[in-house]
Amino acid sequence: MNGMSKIVKTISSIIFPFILIYGLYVIAHGHLTPGGGFQGGAVVTSGLAMILVAYGSVWTMGKIKEKNLSLFESLGAICFILLAFLGLGFGAVFFNNFLVGSDFLFGTIPATGSGLADINTGGVLPLMNFAVGLKVIVGLFVIVLVMAYASSIKEGKQ
Amino acid sequence: MNIVDAVLAHSPALIVAVPLIGAFLTPLVSRLNDKLRNIFVILVLGLTSSLVLLLASDIFTKATQGLPSIHRYVFGSQDLALPVVRILFEVDGMSIFMAIISAILALMAVIYSWAFMKENTGLDKYYTLILLMTAGMLGMELTGDMFNFFVFLEITSISSCALIAFWTHKGEAVDAAFKYIVISAIGALFVLFAVALLYGQYNALNIAVLANAIQYTFLDKIALVLLIVALAMKAGIVPMHMWLPDAYGRAPSSVTLILIGATQASLYGVFRVCFTLYGGVFNSLVITSNTIGWVIATLAIITILMGVTMALRQSDFKRLIAYAAVAEIGYMLLGVGTRLASTYINDYGQITFPAYGATALTGSIFHIMNDALDVGLLFLVAGAIYYATKETSLNRMGGLARNMKYTSIFFIIGLLAVSGMPPMNGFASKLLIYESTYQLNPILAIIAILASIMLLAVFVKVFHSAFMGPALPKFKNVKEVSKSMLIAMGVIAAIIIVFGLFPNLVVENIVRPAADALIQHSSYITHVLGGI
Amino acid sequence: MMSKRNIAAIVFFTIVAVFLVFSALKIHSFGVPDHAEMDDEIIANAQQETGANNAVTSVVFDYRGFDTLGEATILFTAVAGVILVFRRLKK
Amino acid sequence: MIFNIPFIAVVALILIGLYAVVFKRNLIKMVIGITLIESGVNLFLITLGYREGSVAPIYTSSPGGIMSLPVPQALTLTSIVIGVAVLALMLSLVVHIYRHYGTLDARKIGRVEE
């Protein structure tokens, strides 16, 4: 897979930032509007996969070493489980939502009943959304990249 | 010493969280250097095993003194509101008993694979997957929530499938892994379908709440059948055991050791579904529990005979041990089948089961631990031979006892233990199963004993062809395997001998509380719904 | 000629088919769940307990957060498995 | 609503998937079959959580009225990601089997090593 024509490459590099912004929006507003870590991460990964198809897996593999990609992925996973351990630290129970109601980050509680709420609500939830979002973006992209790269090398029993 | 109490209070969550955070950290640690990563993984699993033993000692001491001994841990908030909304771990005697097996097997596998895996590549992913598989097994055994059980079942299946395909240059390993993942995926999806059926009817996912709410409607029968078939498929019970010899035979030996733990975790799932989730139903309807008991007993006899006869015909070392493992699962089922088939209505009109029913269940649960250790030791010996001679088929081996002294001693111990000979632990548990099945129906017990002797014959043949005989020229420079493999095999052999010499010590204060915990279906429920 | 394996497959398939059809007919009719206490309790106080307006996210990350930890582990396992299968074999 | 049509669709999806897995020889078709079963079970989970005339359980500018059950939607989210993980692993194994055996026919692969 050594990439497509020039037109496809330029168009995909133009569109990619919009997909990225939309995906990050879905991750960031997971606790307000429908969405969250998994769904937003999948949107961003679809943008990255578009870049992979447009520019070819050999070029992308050269650009992004797969080793430090899996570094990011374990980073996202560690953030998620650290949030759970912090729950054990502050809230005395594993996975406790210790930020709700506290005046710390994301602490406020929205008005009950239907209505708009600012992003500063939801306690641990937005942080978990970011951690899972980062993990899904990097994880799914590594799967797509490794499979595309491995099936593109033709030298038989590798 | 409130630190120990605090750790004990949080230990159900830590037992699963420590291997998980270890697995997430392994890629980072292995970026520094390999030796540090091996030490880090052994430390993580050592910490997990000590947490499991700490929790087990607390549960079993309380159980033997008759105090309520179920640990309940709610994730997310301390108090437990009545429509159970959060996930909670419910650790009773049976689940911590299985967790001990999984933790010990994982620790031994990691120590064994320090030297066994030295010349392979991709080791940081290998150790990450081993830690994830351990976390999956422990989560399966400790959880009190049906959907959580499905999630951990899936973690165990995916990580064990990737580990079976570790030697990708050998085509059969990848094929065995594909067979394993197809069967696991279908089994897990049927478990999810059954959980959805139960959720659709009772709007609850917690095992205790469901066990209390189940009225054995037509849909519950379908959910029960789906659950038992799917989990039996994963536990390698006869009609669906095709994947087991390939998976056990093709995977590296250290992976097979943990795979035995994963298979027995699915067997634990079958027990939990039969005795706790549908426990109320089985206790109330004598006819169904008798018929199901007889079905499981005949299935067990078929498993034993199938395992032993196939083991006779194998020429590959590991496939032969894999078929012996299938036969051993038959003995566990025989104990459970006898227990269920022996229920009767006594003259007061209550449902009770005779004394030999209790010994049958105790024997089969004790046999789970014994079998894990015995078959595990045999697989480690097979791995040691493969490591030293790169040879797996028995026809091309011979005279290895000369230069692999310790491995042959461990093989003798494993050989006696698997076929249930007196000094070893296999004898203790099989004796319990024989004497109870004999009282139910003598023919079953006689077939079981004969099959066990045939198993002995099989392994003596293997011992002769692999270890005795003339020294083959091509094994001239074969030297003994390195230290870390011997340590792992030595520890397992030591546990086997200790359990074999003092069986009643182990049965009285570990196995009996586990068996009682499984049977006390009502105390499991009141511990959640009673809100104690 | 139907091989033995084929007959066993057909028997297995028809049994599962019968089970599934009966379960589809016997389940509560679409849109009218039998019980909903657990979910009503979540809908009632999801906003107060977790501070999130989206009840599904509060279930995913707070009420049943441990499932999502298992979820993240499964994705992590799949990535590790794929990289393991496609690794370079020579040192 | 209409006579349980969604549950009939669930059963149809699962049976088609099961047919593909049990009877098809080609490995890729088996993988597609498993994905079909997986989507059937997900549809079953979602349809259990619907209530007549209900609204999505999100409070931000929600039109009010009764809300559909949030728990099945959370379970389906987890089940979809599990489906992705299993699919990714199976496909990478199929790529390796094809590269090693040169064929995707389940019968020939089984025969080679016996």
Image (tube, helix red, strand yellow):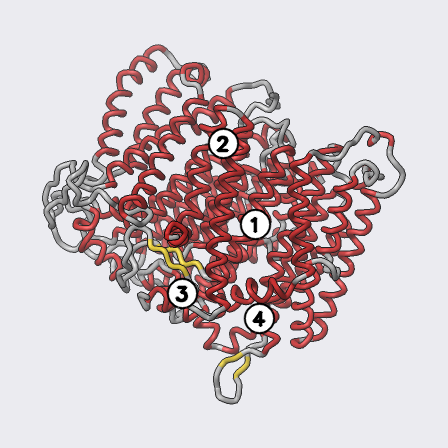
Along the line of sight, which residue is nearer the eye, D6 or A82? A82
Vertical side of B334 occupied by B235: above or below: above
Q: Chain of mark 3?
A: B
Residue position marked by numbered label 2 in the rendering: C82
Is D93 situated left or right of B299 in this image?
left
Q: Residues within 10 Å of mark 3 (few under 14, many from 20)?
A: many
* Residue B41 pos. (x, y %): 51, 36
**Label 2 crowd bin: few (<14), some (14–19), many (20+), radius 10 Å:** many
Asked whether the beta carbons under mark 3 and mark 1 sit within 8 Å of each other, the answer is no
- Residue topped by disc 4: B293
Question: Chain letter of disc 1?
Answer: B
Crowdedness of circle 4 by 10 Å Cα count: few (<14), some, many (20+)? many
Amino acid beneath label 1? Gly
Q: Residues within 10 Å of mark 1 (few under 14, many from 20)?
A: many
Residue at horizontal 35%, vertical 47%?
C66
How far separated are the C-alphas under marks 1 and 2? 23 Å
Front position among marks 4 and 3: 4
Look at the numbered discs 3 and 2 and tell me whether their residues touch, using CB distance below 8 Å: no
Circle 4 or circle 1, nearest the eye: 1
As drawn, the label of residue B261 is: 1
Asked which secondary structure carries label 2, the reply is helix
List the single residue furthest toward the front.
Answer: B1
Q: Chain of mark 2?
A: C
Q: Nearer the viewer, mark 3 or mark 2?
A: 2
Residue wearing tag 3: B219
Residue B384 in view here: yes
- CA–CA distance between discs 3 and 1? 31 Å
Under mark 2, the amino acid is Val
> D22 or A64: which is nearer to us?
A64
Q: CA distance from mark 2 to mark 4?
A: 42 Å
